[in-house]
């Protein structure tokens, strides 16, 4: 069974361009495996969360 470490980021709280952030995470060995859009009470806003995982060796 494989074990993973997980990180979750709120896209609105990242102070970098999305493509730069994704490239940095990929170079650090993190895999983006889920993008989740969570509706907020202030329609039409949504929270976009990025879920990353890295295999524990």
Image (cartoon, rainbow, N blue to C red):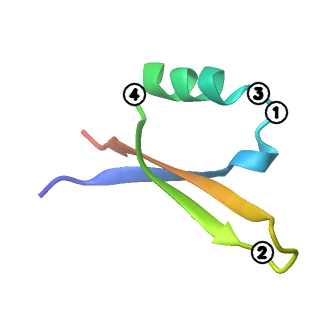
Task: Report if the CB atoms under discs 2 and 4 are less than 8 Å apart.
Answer: no
Q: Residue at x 40, y 50 (%)?
A: 5
Q: Which residue is the site of mark 2?
A: 40
- C-alpha gap between disc 1 and disc 4: 20 Å
Q: Is residue 47 above or below residue 53?
A: below
Give me the C-alpha separation between circle 1 and circle 3: 4 Å
Tell me the distance, in whole angstroms, between the alpha carbons under discs 3 and 4.
19 Å
List the residue tagged with mark 3: 16
Residue 16 % position (x, y): 76, 27
Q: Nearer the viewer, residue 35 or 52?
A: 35
User: Callout 4: 10 Å neighbours few (<14), some, many (20+)?
Assistant: few
Q: Which residue is mark 4?
A: 29
Q: Residues within 10 Å of mark 1 (few under 14, many from 20)?
A: few
Query: In front of the other: label 2 or label 4?
Result: 2
Q: Is residue 33 left or right of residue 56?
A: right
In the rendered structure, which disc, 1 or 4, sits on the residue that comes first in sequence? 1
Question: In which quarter of the view is residue 48 placed?
Answer: bottom right
Name the quadrant of the N terminus: bottom left
Q: Quadrant of the C terminus?
A: top left
Tags 1 and 3 in contact by the CB under 8 Å rule?
yes
Asked if labels 4 and 1 touch by Cβ distance under 8 angstroms, the answer is no
Mark nearer the viewer, 2 or 1: 2
Give neighbour class at mark 2: few <14, some 14-19, many 20+ (Cα, 10 Å).
few
């Amino acid at each position: 069974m494989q074990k993973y470490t997980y990180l979750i980021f709120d896209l609105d709280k990242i102070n970098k361009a999305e493509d730069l952030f994704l490239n940095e995470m990929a170079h650090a060995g993190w895999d983006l495996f889920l993008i989740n859009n969570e509706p907020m009470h202030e329609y039409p806003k949504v929270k976009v969360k990025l879920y990353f995982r890295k295999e524990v060796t």
